[in-house]
Amino acid sequence: MVFEELGLGPDILKAVADAGYTDPTPIQAQAIPTVLQGHDVLGCAQTGTGKTASFTLPMIEVLSNGRARARMPRSLILTPTRELAAQISQNFTTYGKYHKLTMALLIGGVSTEEQQRRLSRGVDVLIATPGRLLDLFERGSLLLNDVKFLVIDEADRMLDMGFIPDVEKIVGLLPKTRQTMMFSATLFPEIHQLAGKFLLSPKEITVTPPATTAETVEEYLVKVSPRDKNKTLRFLLQHETIENALIFCNRKKDVDLLNRSLRRHMFSSATLHGDMAQSAREETLASFKTGEIKFLVATDVAGRGLDIQGLSHVFNFDVPIHAEDYVHRIGRTARAGKTGYAFMLATLAETKYITAITELIGHNISYRNVQDIKVQDSTEASKSESKTKTKPPQRRSQSNKTVSKSAHIERDESKNRPTDPIRNRPKNKPSIKKQEQSKTVRAPSEPSTIKPSQTTHPRAAGWGDHVPAFIQVRSRASN
Ligand code: AMP
């Protein structure tokens, strides 16, 4: 299918072509004609599937006829985060470049004066986070009786962040006769309940099974002790071939701590979290997008919906407490069909969350006790690593001896930091999903140089050839 078949006008088609897109993504192919026909839509689609254009394109088309009146927006898009709001507005700017639609962004963290000025001039498209919208509504800065289109984006996230009471309040202020689209990465029963409240006989469009991860993302689980977490992360950052990476922590204070630690170790990193002023966030994001900053340490809220072109890696420094966050986090990479890599560092205390994640994403994760993980500086591993180094290790040979992971990592860091070449990933590394029908991600079980037949340890399905050579897992059960 091509865009021309969806019922969009020539100006939008031209803007889409200017953006370099030829074929609609599955969510676009299904949602655009449905919205143009005037139906409500319940879309189950992750970020990265092109879902934003699936509602912005038909909205531009419909809104191109008519004019906005002062303080009376004609459409409303509710999003959980400021970043997502900013990305949606970029979509309207890109695809609406041949239309004269007016737009306002009502988000927290920026002055309300400019927002109020825009509203008073009249806006066709209003993109807002629920709190700020209600705030301005209560101050009398806008009226919602002319809203013909409502989009509730990332409804599961709204639910998670406790925004639903605000969303319900807002929906109660809108005209009953309107068209509504609701998108969510997952369609839990609660989301269906909300759909029953907000939508009228919606067409349900699911482009990927609920909570699946992209086919092109390769996922890895690295078991660590809490003490070794920072070191292990630094090791991975040095040894992976990384274009740019998002590193997720569960708490804001850990984001700051980790960022400080990375900077102390000369990594080009910065933070992104909800306590930052909007201008600081925008500056940081701009530096990340231009490559000035290579690593962005973020919380879920800040990282949600970020659209970084070509993001190569996501690191879960903490295992997400909510399983859906895992899907959202790793959805930042492997976008638009590109390959991406997602690592998760897991301590023993975090194993309970991994079970929930694997149930949600439908992969079997083989778990091992942290005490069972030993990093063996085997002859093969040493040989393979020494090929990438200019000097051999300056310490006694550790052949046939198991050493602690931290000691091994420390040695590598001191050799490679900060400018040593990064080890290259094998080019023909098969994707985990391609290797198996039922995907299994396991803790690393062998150096990449050892073939299954050469080792007495079971090969961990799902690690492909990408098991970092420094890691070898021994299961007590198997020894
Ligand atoms: P989204 O899921 O809306 O966050 O979009 C993910 C990415 O896909 C964005 O970088 C879009 O620019 C890109 N995109 C949207 N539509 C298409 C398309 N039809 N073909 C290729 N890429 C697209």
Image (cartoon, rainbow, N blue to C red):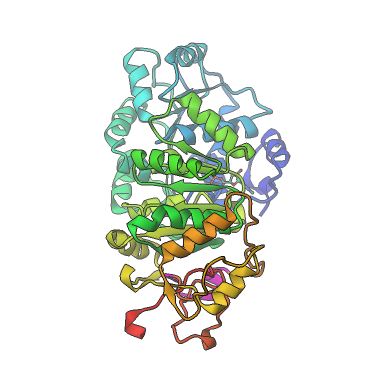
Residue at image x 64%, y 64%? 391
Give the total number of marks visible in the rendering: 0
User: How far across and down, in percent of the image, does residue 84 sit?
Assistant: 48, 36
435 within the magenta span: yes
Question: Observer-nearest residue: 167 or 181?
Answer: 167
Question: Observer-nearest residue: 307 or 227?
Answer: 227
Residue 14 figure quarter: top right
Q: Is residue 102 left or right of residue 12?
A: left
Q: As displayed, is residue 74 above or below residue 448?
A: above
Q: Which range of residues does the magenta coloring cover? A: 431-443
Residue 78 figure quarter: top left
Question: Observer-nearest residue: 265 or 155?
Answer: 265
259 within the magenta span: no
Q: As displayed, is residue 426 above or below residue 93?
A: below
User: How far across and down, in percent of the image, does residue 34 sit?
Assistant: 52, 45
Q: Is residue 241 left or right of residue 439?
A: right
